[in-house]
Image (spheres, coloured by chain):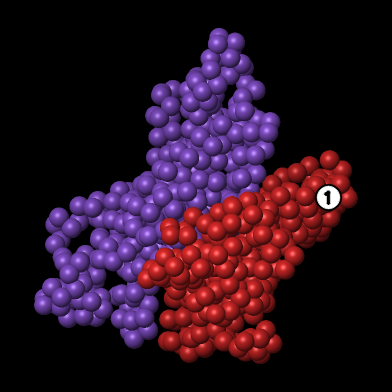
Chain colours: A purple, B red
Amino acid sequence: MGIGSNPLIFDEAEGAAPDSSAVTPSGGEASSTGGFAIQVLRVFVENKLAVVGAVVILFMVLFCFLGPVFYHTNQTNAQLALLNSVENAAPSRAHVFGTDANGFDMLGRIMYGGKASLEVGFAAAAIATVVGVLWGAVAGFFGGWVDTVMMRIVDVLLSIPLLFLLIVLAVIFPRSLGLLILVIGFTAWLVPARLVRGETLVLRVREFVQAVRVMGGTSRRIVLRHVVPNTLGTIIVNATFQVADAILYLAALGFIGLGVPAPQTDWGSMLSNGVDYAASGYWWEIYPAGVVIVLVVVAFNFVGDALRDAFEVRLQRR
Amino acid sequence: MIFYLIRRIFQAIVVLIGVTFLTFILAHVIPGGPARAALGSRATPGQLASFNAQNGYDLPIWDQLYRYFEGLILHFNLGYSYKANQTVRSLILSRLPKTLVLLGISTVFAVIIAVPLGILQTVRRYKPIDYALTGLSFIFYAMPAFLLGTLLILYFAIDLKWFPVAAPSASTVTGILADPRGLVLPILTLSAITIASFSRYMRSSMMEAMAEDYIRTARAKGAGSLRVLFRHALRNALIPIITLLGLSLPTIVGGALITETVFNYPGMGLLTTNAALNDDVPLLLGTTLVAAFATVVGSLLADVLYAVVDPRVRYH
């Protein structure tokens, strides 16, 4: 669902505003070097969209996790909510984004739902990245029938539309936040696996890998200490897009009704609940959740694109 | 060419076998077993045992696997839905054509819109229209299908009343097609994300094609810009789009599920959603299997088309 999750789309950099990110040195002097992270960061900050994206992400994380500390609302007890507020109330001074059908404050609900959405997003992306990287690195490194079997499994899983697989898993197993993280993570590892396998195939014929072999390095050492770090650029870029995808998948599941179980909510479930009332004119029950989903996903896409540029530039300057 | 076809079909068959095997595994990892899933949580052990005996769930696992494959391949037996009291096959057959209609029209529409958009962005690259279209495609890409569908319903169906709120709910394909106004919003929703990604890919693909040497040769020979654009660049730029289409099929089928749920369109997607909400596991697994099959077949067709269009692939 994210641009970066399609391995064939490799030229997304064109889409961002073309600022001159590569500063060519004149007069033959070497461009300043720094550590790996510094070089990447330098290209990253030159891309203004990416900086905006990073700021948005940081703001949303703080908003959702620290916000409730400053803006107390009751988000779990429906009877308590009705004591203090009216259901479906329009935005007002008491409730900045109005209230929903249960009387819960909408602004507080965005924070509450955001906690679940962001948690699932980051955790599922982490699982997907770790599993996918190891799978792809092992498959690409050993080659032969190991590679064929492992990649055939990836092909099989990729043929099933992910949403169907997610739904089946969410229905079969008793649902919880943890299960959703596992389910989304274990369906999303396929793309990083493919990417890392491709890179590994290229890397394993490089001289430094052969040198480690000659020096007696075990396969495990080569894979973990040499192959994986060299594919870090691809991994990080993909992980960024994975977070965006995970948030979208959780939102889709929530919209269908298979999201986090009550009383916890997520942005998708909020949308699903709000749709019924939006038609009656209670617009504040869907717009905040919708806007926030799009904002966060776009922010992650900007950041991912800029990271991709940054890693490519660094490779070119070598 | 024929070797490529055979190889490709063989690959597809391997994947299909794998998908079927996976569905079999999923059917059996349900906590409590398929018996509990069908009979509910209040079934007695006696009822569970007789269910298992009746349906062969007490046989050794290899027997069950063999019978599953045999039933699927020879009899197209996809299982039985106890909640709906019908065979899964009949439920799916009644809904599948409508989903295929939705998918077909949306995909064709998406390609028809995306290709000219990509060309436009190439010809006017780095001008305001390019940035505007890129910005729009970013937003549409990040916008989940259910959000877009909901917003379209709110604006065009409820506020402006141009289109009906729900999709046509006729039970046959002809009934669906008899009310084209009801199809507009679902098709727009389903094709939006596809248009966003295809037009951006088309843009890069065209830009790459325009940078090739044969374009320079064509211009040197005196070809006008239109001829260069359409006769030389476009043909080459379209080829990766076919591959992209094959790769995007799982996403599009997933998108169809969401779109059908939002618009209450009586297709396979809505069937899946309702099965999920009703805990109807046999039906759910049946629709998943069919969706996977459709995706594999679709991507096989895309690869075959690719081989037909690009001679370089065939004579590898």
**Residue in the picture at 68% in, 31% down:** A144
Callout 1 amino acid: Ile
Q: How many marks?
A: 1
Q: Quadrant of residue B71?
A: bottom right
The residue lying furthest to the top in this view is: A215
Question: For this rendering, which residue is in front, B169 or A220?
Answer: A220
Q: Left or right: where does residue A44 sit relative to residue A22?
A: left
Question: For this rendering, which residue is in front, A311 or B5?
Answer: B5
- Residue A199 percent across, percent down from the top left: 59, 33
Q: Quadrant of the C terminus of chain A?
A: top right
A180 to B216, vertically: above or below:
below
Helix, strand or loop under label 1: helix
- Residue B43 percent across, percent down from the top left: 41, 70
- Residue A100 percent across, percent down from the top left: 25, 76
B208 to A232, vertically: above or below:
below
The residue lying furthest to the left in this view is: A83
Label 1 packing within 10 angstroms: few (<14), some (14-19), many (20+): few
Say if residue B255 shows up in the picture: no
**Residue in the picture at 31% in, 75% down:** A285
Question: Chain ID for label 1?
Answer: B
**Residue in the picture at 34% in, 74% down:** A273
Question: For this rendering, which residue is in front, B81 or A223?
Answer: B81
**Residue in the picture at 66% in, 86% down:** B172
A247 to A205, vertically: above or below:
below
Q: Which residue is mark 1?
A: B6
Q: Left or right: where does residue B268 sit relative to residue B226?
A: left
- Residue B66 percent across, percent down from the top left: 67, 55
Q: Left or right: where does residue B245 sit relative to residue A288?
A: right
